Structure formats: structure tokens, C-alpha cells
Amino acid sequence: MEEELPGAIGTSASLALRLGQALFSVASLLFMCVGVEFYAYTSFCFLVTIKGLTIPWSLTLAMVDAFSVFVKRPSRQVQIVSTIVIGDWVLSFLSLAAACSTASVADFMITEAGDFFCGRKLCSRYQLSAAMAFLSWCLSIASALFNLWLLPSLY
């Protein structure tokens, strides 16, 4: 039996990473959508869109991981792992871009514009949304790296 790489697809660590990604993405969306004014800013709409894509991706792969863990037989086909690696990397970069743009706009609103754009409470929610997006990105890049590490061993 081949040695398992912790965090690679089909392991319990991957299941935990995927559930964490989904949890932080949902938290990011909730903090962003509490204020109904988010749609007025492109970076906030970008974050909502990317987190809206990340949640089903993470939950689908979490179901695959849960099935693999309970059956104790991870699926390690090259085509499947390659697709997962590409999807993870694309969503990871987009998630980082969305988190960075949201954090920079929220910081600008607080430091430069004052209460003109948003109240202190609303801006802090935008900051929390960006923080949750960064945490989601950390777990996403970890998944991407583990699966990329697994990929050459399948050939």
C-alpha cells in the first residue's frame, strides 16, 4: 500500500482543509452581505463572486474526501487529481486577489475616507470579511500545494 500524503485528496486532513475553506468562505460572505452596500464596489462584488465559487468547489471535494475516508480507498487517478490541482490553483489565486482587493478598499475607506463611504461598524464588517477570505485562502493554498505534491507520484 502506498504511503498517504497528509492533506492530499482522499485523506482526513484534506477533508478538514476543505471544510475549513468552506467555513471561512461562508463567514466571509456573511460578513460582506450584512451591509447591503457591497454591490457598489467592484472589489466587494469580486470577493462575493469568488467565494460563491469556492464554497461549492470545497464542499464537493469535501464529499469526495469524506467518501474516500469512510471507504478507506482514495481515488488517485491522474486525470482527476490534475483537474483538482488546476481548480485549486485557479481558485486559490482568485481568492487571494479578491481578499487583497477587499482588504485594500476597506482600509482605504477607514483610513482615508473616514465616515464618508461607510460607518465604522459597516467598514469593520468589510475588514472581517477580508480576514475570513485570507484564512480561506491559506487553507486553499495548502490544499493546492498538497495535491500538487501528490501529482508526480501518480505517473
Image: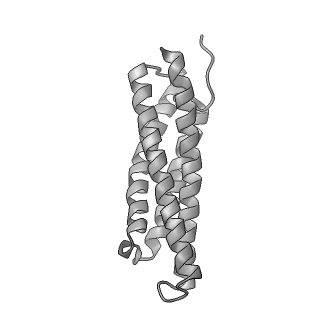
Indicate the position of residue 26 as horizontal and vertical percent values: 48, 57
Along the horizontal axis of the image, is 117 left or right of 45?
right
Residue occupying the point 62% across, 25% down: 5
Residue occupying the point 47% across, 48% down: 93
Residue occupying the point 55% across, 24% down: 150
- Residue placed most toward the observer, 4 or 47: 47
Vertical placement of 21 versus 46: above or below?
A: above
Residue at the bottom extreme, as displayed: 116
Indicate the position of residue 153 as horizontal and vertical percent values: 54, 17
Which quarter shows the N terminus? top right
Vertical placement of 39 versus 80: above or below?
A: below
Indicate the position of residue 104 as horizontal and vertical percent values: 53, 68
- Residue placed most toward the observer, 31 or 143: 143
Residue 59 visible in this rendered orientation of the protein: no
Residue at the front extreme, as displayed: 112
How many discs appear?
0
Along the horizontal axis of the image, is 12 left or right of 42?
right
- Residue placed most toward the observer, 77 or 116: 116
Vertical placement of 115 versus 138: above or below?
A: below
Residue 97 visible in this rendered orientation of the protein: yes
Indicate the position of residue 61 as horizontal and vertical percent values: 45, 37
